[in-house]
Amino acid sequence: MLNHITIMGRLTRDPELRRTGSGIAVASFTLAVDRDFPNKESGEKETDFIDCVAWRQTGEFVSKYFTKGRMAVVSGRLQIRKWQNDQGENRYSTEVVADNVYIGDSKRDGNTGSSPTPAPSYTPPVTPDASDFALLDDDDAQLPL
């Protein structure tokens, strides 16, 4: 069986980062995802508002680098939770449990939120010194076929 979903949209609000009793990070956010086709009656495109949840490092990443208005690409699984309200009625919540969240726009294009979003830090690779290498025998017999 397969339960995989990938969506792309803009955050409707800043992510909410919380922690469980054991300290595990969980971020909740909602994406506004435009439909690819217009409504038959009005001729206008409609938007779906999809709740998402990201756990652990992914949740911390979302909380740190995303703000309202930023474009995000979320890859994960669809989850439907059943719960009861105060009146004892059964309710259902549908959400995407994010395995991966990617930045879907450039900082310049999509930063419509209230605060600037820092870019992830980049450390260039270290170029090895020639003395770090050793000559190998010309025996290819040990290489796999």
Image (cartoon, rainbow, N blue to C red):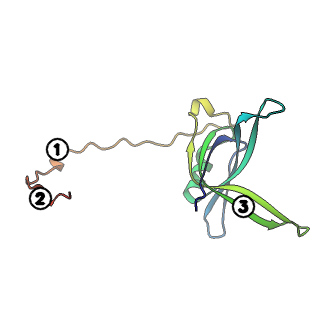
Between discs 3 and 1, the one toward the N terminus:
3
Mark 3 highlights which residue?
80
Q: Is residue 141 above or below residue 104?
A: below
Query: Which of the image's four quarters has the N terminus?
Result: bottom right
Mark 1 highlights which residue?
130
Q: Residue furthest left?
A: 138
Q: Quadrant of residue 108?
A: top right
* The disc label shown at residue 141, or none: 2
Between discs 2 and 1, the one toward the N terminus:
1
Q: Amino acid at mark 2?
A: Ala
Residue at 79% from the left image edge and 29% from the top image edge: 43
**Viewer-side residue, 84 vs 54:** 84
Residue at 60% from the left image edge and 49% from the top image edge: 62
Q: Amino acid at mark 3?
A: Ile
The local crowd at label 3, few if under 14, some if 14 to 19, many if 20 or more residues have their Cα within 10 Å, is: few
Provide residue 23's location: percent of width, then percent of height.
61, 66
The local crowd at label 1, few if under 14, some if 14 to 19, many if 20 or more residues have their Cα within 10 Å, is: few
Between discs 3 and 2, the one toward the N terminus:
3
Q: Nearer the viewer, mark 3 or mark 1?
A: 3
In the rendered structure, the answer to whether residue 104 lies left or right of residue 36 reads left
Provide residue 99's location: percent of width, then percent of height.
57, 55
